[in-house]
Image: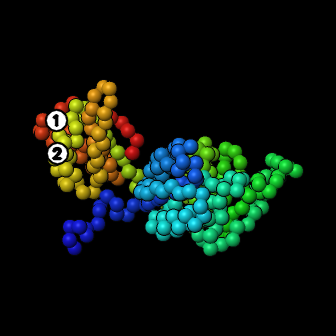
Amino acid sequence: MSQAEKPDPFTQGRVTAAVLIIGDEILSGRTQDTNLRDIARYLGAHGVDLVEARTVADVQAEIVAALNALRSRYDYVITTGGIGPTHDDITADAVAAAFGVELHEHPDIIAMMEARWGDELNAARRRMARVPHGGELVNNPVQGPPGFTIGNVFVLAGVPQIMRGMLQDVGPRLKGGAVVVSRTLRVEGSGEGAVAAPLEAVAKAHPGLSLGSYPFYGQDGFGTNLVVRGRDPGEVEATLTELISVLREAGVANLQVVETPA
């Protein structure tokens, strides 16, 4: 096996996920997406690596194509958006088409709606009760009808507060791996050119970890955040110490370990 063909020890055995963000309002810039950040952090805490995200318009064929590509490649897919009461909320239709099943009005959702709206339960609201055959409900503790899951796909709302509430019912259903831990070294007054060689040397010595460089600029100066990520906290901490030593030997100063989320 050549060097290029050798498996990456950082990615071996991990549990993976993708996010499919659905909605014309995201692509037009009218609405700023924050769900991706929240999902990434939530999954990471459950030992699931978010490794891809796509955004598609409210076009059923595009949603189906993206969903089929993602669900065949990753352990889990989470979709957000497009499960409301309006004509352009077509996520349920697309998910059913992707799995080759029909939609049906879930009796539990209809019961919830009747209790809330009574005689005001119109056709538009009933659209939110449609679930693909074989799907199970995802609890919504915030407001409105539940989401649903089918296969390895979780279909959640696009409204951030509601989406975060639904996530709480997703976590217990995930088969997670080892949680990734992260340590960040802030290097002030030195750009990536100054730290590249020491960083590369340490990265090559620890192929089971992920080492990255992220420059920053601002009114207070510039520098680079060096991030060490891995599944063994002891190895991550030891590698951080080694990185500090190698940088100092290379004449790089102004080093500070800072706390950042994984």
| Secondary structure of the residue carrying numbered label 1 | loop
Q: Quadrant of the N terminus?
A: bottom left
Q: Where residue 162 sits: x, y (%)?
A: 63, 45
Residue found farthest to the front: 28
Is 3 displayed left or right of 215 in the figure?
left
Q: Residue 198 carries which label?
A: 2
Q: Residue 27 carries which label?
A: none
Q: Is residue 215 above or below residue 26?
A: above
- Compare residues 136 and 34 and report the one nearer the observer: 34
Please report the residue visible at 22 percent of the width from the left and 31 percent of the height from the top. Answer: 189
Q: Could you give the CA–CA distance between mark 1 and mark 2, rounded to whole angstroms?
A: 10 Å
> If you read the primary sequence from the N terminus, does the residue marked by circle 1 or circle 2 appear first?
2
Tally the marks: 2
| Residue 154 placement, left or right of 137 | left
Residue occupied by mark 1: 252
CB within 8 Å, label 1 to label 2: yes
Give residue 183's quadrant in the image. Answer: top left
- Residue 119, horizontal then vertical, whole percent: 88, 50
Q: How is the rendered protein coloured?
A: rainbow
In the rendered image, which quarter contains the C terminus? Answer: top left
The amino acid beneath tag 2 is Pro
